[in-house]
Image (spheres, rainbow, N blue to C red):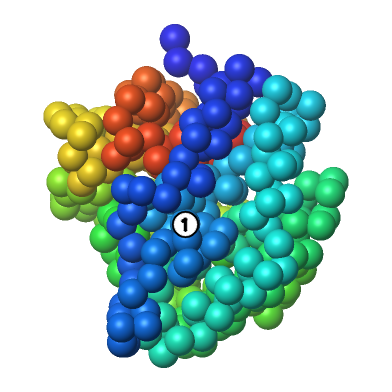
Amino acid sequence: MTAARLTEDLALRFARIALGHVRREYPNKPDHTLAGPQDAQTPRELHPIFYGSYDWHSCVHSYWMLARLLRRYPGFVAAADIRALFDEQLTPDKVAVECAYLAAPTARGFKRPYGWGWLLKLAAELSLLDDKRWSEIIAPLAEAFAQRFRDFLPLATYPVRVGTHFNTAFGLRMAADYATVTADSEFATLLRETALRWYGEDTDCPAWGEPSGDDFQSSALIEAECMRRLLEPDQFLTWFDKFLPRLARQEPATLFRPATVTDRSDGKIAHLDGLNLSRAWCWRALAGALPEGDARRVIAGATAAEHLAAGIPHIAGDYMGEHWLASFAVLALEEEP
């Protein structure tokens, strides 16, 4: 039976995976626009902190996972290695280079909104550690990304509803945790008002397009999780009843069936392992938001467990999944059902 919570043994397994790739520079898939020959630099030169893990955003959320594991198990076997990594990598000079990268006109859309949300999620997690040094050091970079949200959201007339990095509900949901830990009520209001503007009138979600062949998020479920996170409980339940009105009948059926993964060496197909894990995370969160005695709560919890069981065995084995999947497993395992 698949573990339903994060144990110390699992934390150690996941930490060792991440410690094995956050400083692995190659292979690397940069998201980088060259304005001239001077911009042809190595990943480590461009991003002295987040140059590993195949791509920048995966490196960021691997750091988040390591921070979460350190907070949960501060005395576990990998704790010293995580602290040493943070001491070496999270320095003012390296943060300044990461910030300078964002200042270039060519970087305006860099990692929007997926990487933006994950960087703020990392900053929020670091602020919850007993040792506040790393949180204070990364604060300028976090604030730069928070400002990107503030500048972008009023301009974004429409949401992006895909199941990949460009999904806007995911960005709002992750940024909400940063707004909470920094007690930034204006930022939280902006996130909530944007969510209502984009998704507040959505009803009877068909989810007929899920899953697509390279999804690692459910556009339906991450929207629901975004609204759960940003709305008051009663307001959310009213919205959710209209958004998935046939959930008690397990419809739309596609949301209840784990995705099939046929080739884990193919980076796009391997995304579907992440879909199973991210669906587990969303289903567990949604189950926790439903009232005791509500039949949908049991259905959501059971569906989460089924998706978790489909995803957990495939965290490692091929680098196309190994460089990022553990982070989503921790999201799912740490969500209280």
Residue 106, quarter of the rendered image: bottom left
Q: Residue at x 42, y 83 (%)?
A: 108
Q: Residues within 10 Å of mark 1 (few under 14, many from 20)?
A: many
Residue for badge 1: 51
**In the picture, which quadrant includes the N terminus?**
top left
**What amino acid type should be assigned to the residue bearing mark 1?**
Tyr
From the top left corner, tell me how far across and down residue 317 is, in percent.
33, 25
**In the picture, which quadrant includes the C terminus?**
top right
Q: Is residue 297 left or right of residue 76?
A: left
Is residue 134 visible to us here?
A: yes
Is residue 251 visible to us here?
A: no
93 to 324, vertically: above or below: below
Q: Residue furthest top?
A: 1
Q: Is residue 98 left or right of residue 325?
A: right
Residue 69, quarter of the rendered image: top right
From the top left corner, tell me how far across and down residue 59 is, in percent.
48, 51
Q: Residue at x 21, y 52 (%)?
A: 206
Q: Is residue 279 left or right of residue 77?
A: left
From the top left corner, tell me how far across and down residue 219 is, in percent.
31, 55
Q: Residue at x 40, y 40 (%)?
A: 323
